[in-house]
Image (spheres, rainbow, N blue to C red):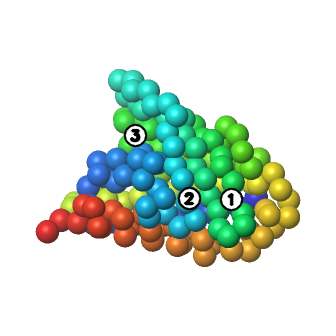
Amino acid sequence: MPSASLRKEISCSRENLIKMVLDVEKYPEFVPWCLDGKIHKKKYYENKIEIIADLTIGKSFFNETYKSHVIYDKLSDSIYVTNIDGPLKHLENSWFFKQKGDNSEIDFHIDFELKNKVLNLVIVKFFDLGLKKIADAFEMRALELFKRR
């Protein structure tokens, strides 16, 4: 099962980064291999936001849609994602946000497995490169939207 963690410091506010990560429908504009993002349900509670969303991921002949359950915990400034349906046998990812002066630090953790064992083997080979590319895309998007002038 592929899993990884990464930490990045980005030059914008924690609040803006959280809003950007929760805006799943904008992912196709900047996330590599993301073809579509759709929020089906969004509920607001006193200390959390709960989202049910689809992401369609693909390249050339391959594309798949998976449904996920997203919880933003306002008290811990964290986002936790699990899969509900689709090509993933297992998905857990978490985002932790900290303000550090004028910058924000993101800790990102992901652990997943595809139902298709052959595709899972292919993904494992390119996982680190893909994760770096996606992390860089989030950073570039944040700088584009929120960079302090």
Say whether disc 1 or disc 3 marks the residue closer to the N-terminus. Answer: 1
- Please tell me which residue lies in front, 61 or 92: 61
In the depicted structure, whether residue 134 falls above or below residue 113: below
What's the residue type where badge 1 is placed?
A: Asn
Q: Does the residue at mark 1 contact the one at mark 2 (Cβ under 8 Å)?
A: yes
Residue to which mark 1 is pinned:
63
Query: Which residue is painted at 79% across and 62% down in the image?
Result: 120
Q: In the image as oriented, which residue stretches furthest toward the front? A: 61
Say whether disc 1 or disc 2 marks the residue closer to the N-terminus. Answer: 2
- Please tell me which residue lies in front, 145 or 93: 145
What's the residue type where badge 3 is placed?
A: Ser
Query: Which residue is painted at 37% across and 36% down in the image?
Result: 74
Q: Secondary structure at mark 3?
A: loop
Label count reads 3
* Foreground tag (3 vs 2): 2
Residue to which mark 2 is pinned:
35
What's the residue type where badge 2 is placed?
A: Leu
Inter-mark Cα distance, 1 to 3: 34 Å
| Residue 72 position within the rendered picture, expressed as x and y whole percent measured from the top left | 44, 38
Residue to which mark 3 is pinned:
76
Q: Is residue 115 visible?
A: yes
Q: Secondary structure at mark 1?
A: strand
Check residue 14 in the rendering and tell me which mark sits there, or answer none: none
Query: Which residue is painted at 46% across and 56% down in the image?
Result: 27
Q: Quadrant of residue 116?
A: bottom right
Inter-mark Cα distance, 3 to 2: 30 Å
In the depicted structure, whether residue 123 falls above or below residue 96: below
- Please tell me which residue lies in front, 50 or 4: 50
Q: Does the residue at mark 3 contact the one at mark 2 (Cβ under 8 Å)?
A: no
Inter-mark Cα distance, 1 to 2: 8 Å
